[in-house]
Amino acid sequence: MLSYRHAFHAGNHADVLKHLVEVLALQYLVQKEDKPLCYIDTHAGPGTYDLRGAFASKNREFDSGIERLWRRNDLPPALAHYVDLVRGFNAAGELSQYPGSPAIAARILHAGHRLQLFELHPDDAAKLAHWGERDRRVNVQQGDGFAALKAILPPPEKRALVMIDPPYEMKTDYTTALGALQSASRKFATGVYALWYPLLDRKEVAMLVRKLEAMPVKSLLVELPVRAEGDGMHGSGLFVVNPPWVLQQQLESCMPYLQAMLASAGALPWRLRSSGG
Ligand SMILES: C[S@@+](CC[C@H](N)C(=O)[O-])C[C@H]1O[C@@H](n2cnc3c(N)ncnc32)[C@H](O)[C@@H]1O
């Protein structure tokens, strides 16, 4: 089943949290200027999103996400790193483009770094390949990112951020994502991993979070509820394995602001929990 298209959701609250973590993790990893680095994205999407296009403008999910942060001049510094990067894609000063996870990585990585991107949907894979065709650091493969991950680890660079951002369109995505992260982190134990998941009132989510937190790794879990629990997604979370040491402090500094901006009354409080360290 391949009906999911992320362009319908581009720039929403879940993208804000996910891409904030991506920006902060990558900015930390590129500080070692002379060291090679690989960015691996198992579910890369099309690369960038046109917020004026038919898909993104259908439900305008970005209105309750990046749009609420876009013009603020009181952003906490860690959040400003992410918002400034998005501003850089919108030179005209109007929010019309939203960078996907590959475009965010391409902006932060240096010349000698590498992006290894997987996307299953043929249309989005074609868009992604077109987006990356002029960038020699980028390698795009149309295929199953879960299956590919194990085969490409450890990367020759021995340093990597692995983003795992499934659509959870199928119930099996929960167990597949968990299994992929567990086996990847065994095979390449020093890699930094970020797994995104939706907050839903479903047993699959509770089971995923319980098993993630039981993994014998150093980790950081962050959750941003944006509405009261009930039908549908009420927020999202990320589970980061081997988080950069500054990430917890950076997220602590911006989660209260982020929730105040993006959440409605009745949302559960944000959560940040580290373990194994
Ligand atoms: C949540 S979206 C990714 C968004 C992207 N990471 C971003 O931040 O811009 C999930 C993507 O995974 C793709 N997909 C679904 N199953 C996949 C699989 N097994 N392997 C690779 N891509 C898959 C979908 O077509 C969709 O584009």
Image (tube, rainbow, N blue to C red):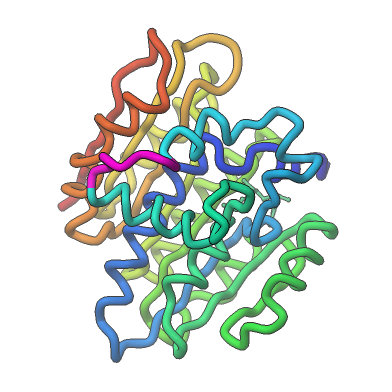
Residue 114 seen anywhere in this rendered image of the structure: yes
Q: Residue at x 28, y 54 (%)?
A: 217
Residue 146 seen anywhere in this rendered image of the structure: no
Viewer-proximal residue among 90 and 232 = 90
Q: Position of residue 169 (x, y in %)?
A: 70, 36
> Number of numbered discs present?
0
Figure check: 10 above or below 244: above
Viewer-proximal residue among 152 and 131 = 131
User: Predominant secondary structure in magenta?
Assistant: loop
Viewer-proximal residue among 230 and 20 = 20
Residue ranking furthest to the front: 92
Q: Position of residue 256 (x, y in %)?
A: 25, 30
Figure check: 144 above or below 252: below
Q: Could you tell me which quadrant the N terminus lies in?
A: top right
Figure check: 141 above or below 114: above
Q: Which residues are magenta?
A: 70-76
Q: Which image quarter: residue 28?
A: bottom left
Q: Residue at x 56, y 65 (%)?
A: 103
Q: Which image quarter: residue 148?
A: bottom right
Q: Residue at x 61, y 79 (%)?
A: 138
Q: Residue at x 32, y 24 (%)?
A: 260
Left or right of 190: which side holds 253? Answer: left
Q: Position of residue 96 (x, y in %)?
A: 63, 49
Judge whether residue 77 is colored magenta: no
Viewer-proximal residue among 64 and 205 = 64
Left or right of 36: which side holds 164? Answer: right
Left or right of 231: which side holds 32? Answer: left
Judge whether residue 72 is colored magenta: yes
Q: Position of residue 140 (x, y in %)?
A: 69, 74
